[in-house]
Image (cartoon, grey):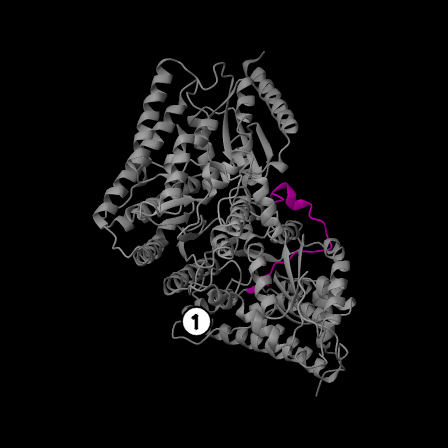
Amino acid sequence: MTNSSTPSGSALVERYYSDYGSRARELKKQGRRFIGYLCAYVPLEIISAAGFIPFRVKGNVHEPISAADAQMETIVCPMVRSYFDQTLKGAWDFIEGLVLPHSCDSMCITHDIWRTSLNLPYFHLLNVPHTISDNSREFFVDCLRTFRTSMERYAGRTISNKAIEAEIEKYNALRKAVRHLYGLRRGDEPRISGSAIVRTLVAAMSLPVEEAVPMVESITIEGSKQGPAFERGTPRVMIVSSEQDDDGLASIVEECGGAVVSDFTCPGLREYGQDVEPHTDPLVGLAGRYLNLNCARTYRGETGKQSDDFEERFGIIGRLATDFRVRGVIIRVHRCCDPYGLEVPALRSYLANHGLAVLYIEDDYSIMDIGRLRTRIQAFIELISGSLETGVNIV
Amino acid sequence: MIPRMVKDMLAAGQRAHEEGKLTAYTLIASAYDEIIRAMDIVPLWVENFAGICSAKRNAMPFLEKAESHYFSRSMCTYALCCLGFDALREESGGMPANAPWGGLPRPDMMLGTGTMICDPRVKWFQAARQYMPDVPIHMTNILWPAYQQNIDHREIQDYYIRFMVSELRDLVAFLEKRTSRKMDWDRLAGLVDLADRTWNLFWETHELRRAVPTPMGTGDAFNTMVPLVFMLGTQQALDFYAALNQELKNRINNRMASVPDEKYRLMWGGGLAPWFALSDFDYFAAKGASFPVEISYRLAEPLYNLNVPRTSDPIEHIVWRWFKYLTYWYDAARKRNGSYPEVERMIRYIDDYQIDGIVIHEAFSCRTWHPGLICQLNTLKKIYRDIPTLVLESDMVDIGSYNESETHQRIDAFIDMLENETSHKSGS
């Protein structure tokens, strides 16, 4: 029997998305402890096995960067600068530590800035190799052991393999729940909008995994019961990006008449597409999953032929585009992003060869900057609406 | 002498095939210098080539070409310059008409590195492969532990060393396959020894610049670093520093200063050089400001300071040398509250070279060497002393970011500040 006073999944999403961190503040008052982190490369299972709640630090596209500029150069990725700006301004004052992965220059090179400016009791830079090989996996397992030791020292307790395995099970449940949610988007009449998906996943980033899973599951249930979010025939669009922690772009696409039915972003299918596989050493399982995240910061594709190289790097995007019957792909890259920026021409080429219309946009993360792209997005949606039978267009 | 050496390096690449040698796109400070030379592979230093284009103020066509292929202008302009050049070279089937010094030849392979810094090193050659799809890439991880306060790097060095050794062995295997030749390990050991001696001599030579007045400034150091970073493992590099060492000693003995009327001693505290504007060092010099020391491109410490463990394996030795260099300042940082390695290095140079002020250059397209410089200066002020600093802003390749008049005005204001400081100190 449902409790009529229990908020619906949608209500929780709207609350935790629009007031990001509010649940963490409530839980902090109850004595729970939080460790902040940036990026999908941080193994959350280790943080939660240590007794902390991992909290994904994010930026604010609606707020100009100000405090950060006194400490962090403006040539750093605008998204990371915004993360730092919000943290400096106290938006996440409930975190007692921060874990930065060596994912990209903007995160790794700035680690001294984060560490010295915030002066949090706990700070760790997690090293991540740039390749996926037996050597790299072995090394990354060692890096995870070091991370575990670092957390143990701070937490003042041992983190057992069993504790990590228990957290792996919970986070795998979240990954499955998200993939199940995405199933609502496959049909001819998707049951949930892309902007709602973004809000759901962003809200989930701020919650303990025990709360995130039921919230995502309830969104799926709600979505399956409601009518279509888009009419049949609405041009189906996929967004490919590094991190997307705001619904601005998806909302504009949908306001312009498109249906965002898939993505390859974080949070999104890049992050939730793969589980941690069981292993006698859970760190090996974690290393296998996290190292394999298909982010541009990792060098993939050493098979020799360029076509094989492209398939290794972009094949997952191609398969998702097919699976979700996408007509057009928007590649969104933030300014000053070398890993994704250097991939753009190759990715455009790959997608075009797969018969997909492509729009490449570069922005500085702020909502104003995304807004000025409305005209181009509108034109793109009209293009793919009109070209359903006529072939490929690249913008 | 350096321009001749750089031209010769490019020429070696251009005639490599005639000599039956293979070429490789290579990146600075990638720990593979001796390895590629032991395999007789001719390195084509792509960042150096972009620097040449920049210094000759000839990079714009290549940057624009890259931008026309949807590479963002906000990205590393070393990469953009070379990608644009690759595109033009491949489209035309020959060297572009405006290629500086004969141009960058098409390589037989590309040797990328995934390090703690510099994302372009991981993705650049993949992007270049669009223009050269048949050219294979090998990627080597060169990683070191970040400075962390609750983990001593010595606790974890074993697995870092193990990993990097395995990475370099994989590189050797790749090169053996490409060249159809086996590594001559004795030859490699000889080149490693040569490199060690070059590191020692490089450092000893630069220590001579402590003299007052300094015999050589950063403007020259940005040229004389070429043998260390692009010719390591060659007798020519060692001979160059032997000659430079002697020259500086002569200059000191004869009081031949870099800046004859040296009034202010400045440190280049960080940032890649604006290669198109090295003449700004002359502007500083005209105002009595010398640069006895720089952080950028000072890519060596003497082996006798590094405590590199003894090993007969040249690969292990290479890895230990780099590991010890990259973690060299960690212990000093632990000893001073609130400090960290980059700041400790600054403090040592300020003391050793009697520095009056610091100049940094923020190059807009490089997230490798430039984020964190402001924080270093802030930290320096907090834990050491309030030393006059000047921040210059432009780029290392994109001359469109540079305004000479504005830069000179900033320098003028900085010199005025130094003059005030000096007056206050002398009580006048």
Q: Which residue is mark 1?
A: A285
Q: Nearer the viewer, residue A219 or B170?
A: B170
Q: Quadrant of the N terminus of chain A?
A: bottom right
Q: How many marks?
A: 1
Q: Nearer the viewer, residue B320 or A32?
A: B320
Residue B302 x/y as whole percent: 32, 36
Residue B284 x/y as whole percent: 55, 22
Q: Nearer the viewer, residue B243 or B412?
A: B243
- Compared with B108, A304 (above or below) is below
Provide the major secondary structure of the magenta segment: loop
**Would residue A73 be counted in the magenta stretch?**
yes
Say which residue appears at 56% left-offset and 68% top-offset. Answer: A271
Give the chain of mark 1.
A
Say which residue appears at 23% left-offset and 46% top-offset. Answer: B187
Answer left or right for B165 relative to A378: left
Looking at the rendered structure, the secondary structure element under dot 1 is helix
Task: Please report the bounds of the magenta region as a residue range.
Answer: A53-75
Looking at the rendering, which quadrant does residue A55 occupy? bottom right
Residue B340 visible at all: no
Q: Specify the farthest residue to the top.
A: B428
Disc 1 residue type (three-letter): Gly
Q: Quadrant of the C terminus of chain A?
A: bottom right
Answer left or right for B302 relative to B96: left
Looking at the rendering, which quadrant does residue B412 occupy? top right
